[in-house]
Image (cartoon, grey):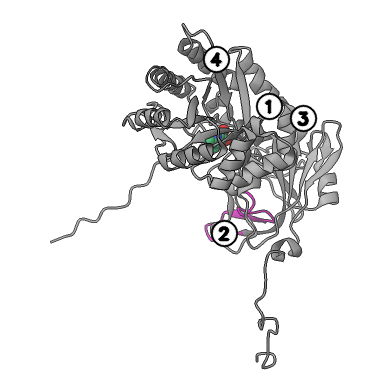
Amino acid sequence: MNAIVRKPWSKPVLTPHRSGGANKFGNARRGNFTADIDGVPIAELVAKHGSPLFVLSERRLRENARRLLRAFRTRYPRVRYGWSYKTNYLDAVCATLHQEGAWAEVVSGFEYDKARRLGVPGSRIIFNGPYKQRAALERAVADGALIHLDNLDELYMLEDVARAAGKIVPVAMRLNFDTGHTEAWSRFGFNVESGAAHDAARRLAAGGALRLTGLHSHIGTFVLDPRAYAAQIKIMAQFMDFAEREASAKIEYLDIGGGFASRNALQGLYLPPDQAVPAIEQYAETIASAMMEAVRGRKEWPWLILETGRAVVDDAESLIASVVGSKRLPDGRKSLILDAGVNILFTAYWYHHDCQPTRAIDGIPEETMVYGPLCMNIDIMRTSVWLPPLDIGDTLVFNPVGAYNNTQWMQFIQYRPPVVMVRENGDVAMVREGDTLETMVSQERLPSGLDQLFPQGLPE
Ligand SMILES: Cc1ncc(COP(=O)(O)O)c(C=O)c1O
């Protein structure tokens, strides 16, 4: 009998080729290149700081934050913004956004300490995350931070901390539910549909040590349909009514998390970002009108809290990398080796980052595979991008790369490069030195007896 052999199912993907129209010689020359960042020549940046190099734009970062706040505050009057530290917690990024009026949104004791060290008062910190150590909760209670509960064990622990401190601590609950628009994330917070969130709110009220003053949810990331947020707000508002009616709560804010898409090309998405990604004003329009509906009839309107990460920082940072080698693959395709790989550009796993030469290059563009420098098969920066003939030493600029790379990068095989910021006045400031051998080994300790490497003499 013949066994039925099933092939594994793989998601079909259509990828448009954006090589430009053909002329009589083949593909048209693609003149696109980026020679400077905010007026500072890339060649100058590389000559001074080397390659690879991350470059932040202070101007773009500030503009993005201002545009977000303007879009929301003009449509709903009570808006607060918490900068999502894990998106990019370089001090320079956080400080710039705090200057623009952002609170800190942190998800661990480490991020909490980083915000405090930078000078953010506890009263301006939103403390999220599924694991908060007791010591971090004690600090947050003492500082008056906004603590967002993730689960019942945390609720019990916080009650204990509150009693020990002799305080009734205001808290928010993180909720999860299905908006019907995005994949429902159910692992964070209390589930609404199952009734677990309702039980937890009643339990919280009965404990007498905590006071429910806020609701939080984060429905996902790179959410392309603003209507998902309208559904989110409707569900949160229904829960707010329940909590005020049956769990002695007085809700002062609805925190809708982050998730607005940045102008990046998500893998598997057919349309380019300019067409697929809604403008911030479109998100604001839909969210503000859902908020207006939610507050109808209420004397005091709750604050709307945003925790927008990637949409604010992504296009404010670029990565410059140099071509260090090239070869033809067995299937005839051109390939390049760069000095920057997925160890520092983690998001290359899910975005097709825009990647441009930094000078005008003559020659016919070719489909090119772009590898990083790691001795690992998975170190691929772009599987297919149309590039003109590049020489060794030519540089490429990747953008947007500001979200999740400077926090998820790894010490793996290569040193992590420096990060500089082009200031609004055109100055270039170092904001994080590159790794050195000292960075890599400073935490290592060699147990005694292991310092003599070859006690029997050098091996043959
Ligand atoms: C609780 C919370 N808030 C905010 C964010 C920022 O999300 P994004 O970068 O998609 O805006 C995240 C990211 O996952 C998150 O988990």
**Where is mark 2, residue-wise?**
329
Give the x, y percent position of residue 59.
77, 30
Instruction: Say which element carries label 4.
Output: helix
Decide: marks 3, 1 in contact (CB < 8 A)?
no
What residue is at 41 percent from the left and 39 percent from the top?
152
Instruction: State which tag comes first along the sequence, 4 or 3.
Output: 3
Majority secondary structure of magenta residues: loop
Closer to us: 196 or 30 = 196
Instruction: State which tag comes first along the sequence, 3 or 1.
Output: 3
The magenta stretch is 328-345
Residue type of the residue flagged with mark 4: Glu
Q: CA distance from mark 1 to mark 4?
A: 17 Å
Q: Is residue 233 highlighted in magenta?
A: no
**Where is mark 3, residue-wise?**
59
Mark number displayed over residue 64: 1
Mark 4 nearby-residue class (10 Å; few <14, some 14–19, many ≥20): some
Instruction: Say which element carries label 1.
Output: helix
Which of the 4 quarters of the picture holds residue 28? top right
Pair 3/2: label in front: 3
Q: CA distance from mark 4 to mark 2?
A: 49 Å
Q: CA distance from mark 4 to mark 3?
A: 25 Å
Pair 4/2: label in front: 4
The quadrant in which the C terminus is found is bottom right
